[in-house]
């Protein structure tokens, strides 16, 4: 076995990395960190904000970037995204399935449309991107897929997230079975389970929860009780993803890394 130097293990020059939900939050943090490590980056997001972020990353790190406006729950959008990746870059080294939503709504108040939307973006979107990425990666017999799950894939964090938890349990199940399916092709498939990470999406959710708490009948919010004493930052998820996508994790597949400041210990 060829033993690489540590700095070589974390050098992503010449690699193409696709991040979904990359316009902000954890996804943008991941895109930025891989660009800093030298990778060419495809940013896919339903929000057009990613266009400007792609330009900034190209200027800052001198890498090639491409923004593709994509709704990951749409099969047509996802197929078109991977066609563009194949055309522009000819290959894909790593996919980070990060796009996701986490609206809070108790099951007894949830209409079917919201249930379906959460599953469509979080679970169907992850499946569609895994399938299309897998088709590209088997051609080179090499690749990494990283699914951003959640601590909620393992244990509920709050009342009101049942639909979200179902979708993230699904993401973790998909990750394990796909790791089995793709191991013969030398494609690793892993997941990350973030705890509470300070992002635009969480700020919006917290603002909504504060409003709901003004209603005495609203379900009690679980306090953010993290042994590490603070929320996580997007870049802390990004460095975890960088490890998983690198040859530092060359024997790691079908695993989930919990990055939660000890939240699940409670
Ligand atoms: N922030 C946390 O505390 C936390 C904890 C555990 C898991 N996660 C997971 O991490 C991921 C990112 O979370 P975040 O906090 O950065 O969220 P965020 O809301 O800050 O950012 C999410 C990004 O996904 C994009 N997006 C939403 N729907 C999409 C769709 N249909 N197609 C393509 N892009 C879409 C948004 O436009 C946005 O850019 C999610 O999967 C979330 O479930 C987050």
Image (cartoon, rainbow, N blue to C red):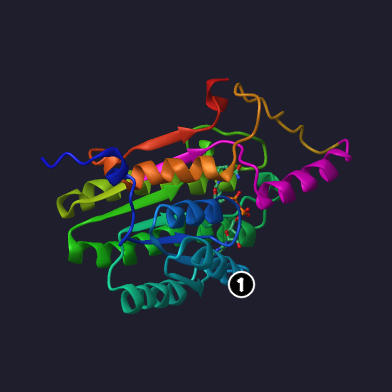
- The x, y position of residue 62, in whole percent, is 45, 65
The part of the image, by quadrant, that contains residue 215 is: top right
The part of the image, by quadrant, that contains residue 126 is: bottom left
Of 149 and 143, the residue lying toward us:
143
User: Does the beta carbon at disc 1 come under 8 Å from ligand 1?
Assistant: no
Q: Which residues are magenta?
A: 190-216
The quadrant the N terminus occupies is: top left
Is 68 situated left or right of 222 in this image?
left
Is 34 situated left or right of 7 in this image?
right
Residue at image coords 22%, 53%: 182
Residue at image coords 30%, 41%: 254
Residue at image coords 85%, 37%: 217
State whether residue 203 is above or below residue 220: below
Of 223 and 113, the residue lying toward us:
223
User: Quick one: SS at disc 1?
Assistant: loop
- The x, y position of residue 196, in whole percent, is 61, 37
Is 10 situated left or right of 263 in this image?
left
- Residue 116 colored in magenta in the image: no
Residue at image coords 31%, 52%: 144
State whether residue 162 is above or below residue 70: above
The part of the image, by quadrant, that contains residue 63 is: bottom left
Of 10 and 96, the residue lying toward us:
10
Q: Can residue 149 be seen here?
A: no
According to the picture, the residue beneath numbered tag 1 turns out to be 48
- Residue 196 colored in magenta in the image: yes
Where is ligand 1, by quadrant? bottom right
- The x, y position of residue 173, in whole percent, is 37, 44
- The x, y position of residue 163, in whole percent, is 58, 48
The quadrant the C terminus occupies is: top right
State whether residue 199 is above or below residue 265: below
Q: Can residue 10 be seen here?
A: yes
């Amino acid at each position: 076995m060829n033993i690489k130097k540590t700095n070589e293990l974390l050098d992503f020059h010449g690699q193409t990395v696709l991040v979904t939900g990359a316009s902000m939050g954890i996804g943008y943090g991941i895109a930025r960190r891989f660009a800093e490590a030298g990778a060419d980056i495809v940013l896919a997001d339903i929000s057009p904000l990613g266009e400007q972020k792609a330009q900034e990353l190209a200027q800052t790190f001198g890498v090639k970037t491409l923004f593709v406006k994509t709704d990951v729950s749409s099969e047509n959008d996802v197929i078109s995204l991977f066609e563009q990746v194949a055309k522009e870059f000819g290959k894909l080294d790593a996919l980070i399935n990060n796009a996701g939503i986490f609206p809070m709504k108790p099951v007894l108040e949830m209409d079917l449309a919201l249930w379906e939307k959460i599953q469509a973006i979080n679970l169907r979107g992850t499946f569609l991107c895994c399938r299309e990425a897998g088709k590209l990666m088997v051609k080179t017999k090499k690749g990494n897929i990283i699914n951003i799950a959640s601590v909620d894939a393992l244990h509920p964090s709050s009342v009101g997230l049942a639909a979200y938890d179902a979708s993230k349990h699904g993401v973790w199940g998909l990750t394990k079975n796909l790791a089995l399916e793709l191991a013969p092709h030398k494609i690793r498939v892993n997941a990350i389970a973030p705890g509470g990470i300070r992002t635009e999406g969480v700020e919006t959710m917290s603002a909504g929860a504060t409003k709901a708490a003004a209603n005495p009948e609203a379900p009690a919010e679980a306090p953010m009780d993290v042994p590490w004493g603070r929320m996580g930052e997007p870049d802390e998820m990004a460095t975890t993803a960088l490890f998983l996508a690198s040859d530092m994790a060359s024997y790691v597949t079908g695993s989930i890394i919990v990055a939660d400041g000890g939240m699940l210990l409670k």
